[in-house]
Image (cartoon, rainbow, N blue to C red):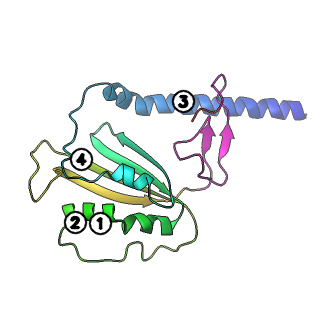
Amino acid sequence: MTSISTAATTRKIRREIGLGTLLAILVFGPTLMVSGQSRTAPPTAGFPDLVGALRNTPGCIGVETAQTASGKQVIFAWFENKKAVLNWYYSDVHRSAVKMFAPGAPARTPMADIPDDGNPVLAIASLTLVNAPPTAAMPLPVSQISIELYRPLPGGLSAGGTFAPAGLNVPGMMKAAVPGAAAGSK
């Protein structure tokens, strides 16, 4: 009976991996095809190196960047906990970036309503560049900018690795190997 249930579980996992792979191809295929085309580099004169600074922030456990099919430039930054996010928020690099976009913004206490319960936080910063020359008022011309915070929910499926950094533990995540994939790939 055990070998029958093990075989059924293996078939179920392989079917879920296959369906997940098909879904990923359908969702990300257009973006991957567009990513091979040349893009105009965003104007960065005088703008701080946010990605490098994030990677060097105590408590930041991983950073990824991407461009969406709609043209948004995105930074994904995973932090160990609320304290680590605040390390970034109060850093010199972040403060100088805020002054560039909102020089007269009032002081505020970030994440005031969020408990510091030790759980990881994902910060997603996205912006849409516009084809306009930089100005004193807008050194990096954008039509949209957003910074959003998320936390991992228990569960999910990981086949051969995750988008999140290797050190991020998601409770209840089902982990499976991808048949025929090289060991250690992420």
Residue at 9% of width from left, 45% of height from top?
133
The location of residue 83, given as percent across then percent down, is: 49, 69
Element type at marker 3?
helix
Q: Amino acid at mark 2?
A: Lys
Q: Main secondary structure of the magenta part?
A: loop
Residue labelled with disc 3: 21
Q: CA distance from mark 1 to mark 2?
A: 6 Å
Q: Nearer the viewer, mark 2 or mark 3?
A: 2
- The residue lying toward the viewer, choosing from 12 and 156, is 156
CB of mark 1 within 8 Å of CB of mark 2? yes
Tell me which label, 2 or 3, sits earlier in the chain. Answer: 3
> Which label was assigned to residue 128?
4
CB of mark 3 within 8 Å of CB of mark 1? no
Name above or below for residue 105 compared with residue 52.
below
Which stretch is magenta? 154-183
> Which label was assigned to residue 99?
2
Residue labelled with disc 1: 95
Q: Quadrant of the C terminus?
A: top right
Name above or below for residue 174 compared with residue 97.
above
